[in-house]
Amino acid sequence: MSAVVHEKYILEPRDAGFCLQLTGDWRFSDGIPDIEPLLQRLSAEPTQQQLNFDGNQLGKWDSGLMTFLVQLIEYCQQQQIEVKTAGLPPGVQKLLTLAFAVPERKGARRQVLGQPILTKVGNVTIEMHRNWSDLLHFIGEIILSTLKMFRGKARFRRSDLLYQIEGAGPSALPIITLIGILIGLILAFVGAVQLRLFGAQIFVADLVGLGMAREMGAMMTAIIMAGRTGAAYAAQLGTMQVNEEIDALKTMGISPVEFLVLPRLIALCITMPLLCIYADFMGIIGGAIVCSTMLDISFFQYFQQIQNAVPLKHFIIGIVKSGIFGVLVATSGCFRGMQCGRSASAVGYAATSAVVTSIVLIVVADAIITIISQILGV
């Protein structure tokens, strides 16, 4: 019978069996040859009952060679072909001895099977129920901690509160400035394209002022803070959960909700309305830039039109919305952080889930507040 020749091995009959000569480098990065030609050659001549190896010309190797040899030896064992590994390098022989020292337990390998659609729906439903139950329990703890704070019995450091206010407030001004001006520019440009067709360019000021005061200022600020601060809260508390710092607080008799969550919640409740007012002003400035450059409307005319068309109540509604959004962002971020598992991937999932939860709650809350305002006529 002829030999099987490959650039990395040669299988040829010798005496009472076969000899497999290995040549060159055997590494995953270089590619591992197909084992099927060898198995077909071995099965074609069952009278040969022995397989020897020649590794004198073997170069560099890694786990790619081991994978190849393990598959080959397992096949030989099934075909009752004796395997002699004396010709292999000592390191390879030791690894093969370890690989076959203990036989694989039947059923030990994981089988990845697709779940039926009803099973997936059931798992999602159970997870949603568990999340809502945990969320209600978490909200209850926050309410109790808030009541204790009003009685002066909440246990958290004032320095932590000031630090969280700085992180959620002044540190967010650059991104709020950029987004606020851009939103104002976009609103004014979209309005200018249509309104100047009717010679009503001055009403661009009404559009920008009303849009920023009631909706866009609070909404965009909340979304920015959800991605910036809410995710940070989830990552911080999730890392504490991984490092068992929250368990240490519980062991010392300190409520994690009072010590960790309450300062973050208060910080966002204080800073969100202020950031909303700042975003409104930046958006109005952005609209003024478009009006002065594209529509020949002076700054005085622009601000005078906004003052006449946008009463104070619209700004108050936006500020109230931002305060509610701040509570939602802080609650979502802290809840996902406290719910985090004890691995690095769990921290990343908690941060992602905090942003998604915050944005969903912000949109739902904004719709509810808008409907209530419409019903009340404000």
Image: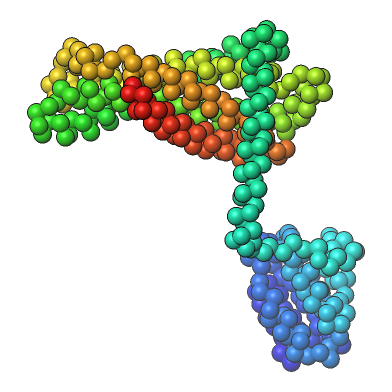
Residue 251 pos. (x, y %): 82, 23
Q: How many marks?
A: 0
Residue 375 pos. (x, y %): 36, 28
* Residue that appears at 48% across and 25% down: 325
Image position of 179 with respect to 173: above or below? below
* Residue that appears at 41% across and 33% down: 367
Can residue 324 be seen? yes
In-front residue for pair 111/267: 267
Q: Quadrant of the C terminus?
A: top left
* Residue that appears at 27% across and 29% down: 187
Q: Quadrant of the N terminus?
A: bottom right
Which of the 4 quarters of the picture holds residue 281? top left
Viewed as shown, does residue 257 lie left or right of 56? left
Viewed as shown, does residue 105 lie left or right of 25? right
Can residue 290 be seen? no
Which of the 4 quarters of the picture holds residue 212? top left
Residue 128 pos. (x, y %): 61, 44
Residue 327 pos. (x, y %): 53, 23
* Residue that appears at 71% across and 23% down: 256
Image position of 8 with respect to 349: above or below? below
In-front residue for pair 219/97: 219
Which of the 4 quarters of the picture holds residue 9? bottom right
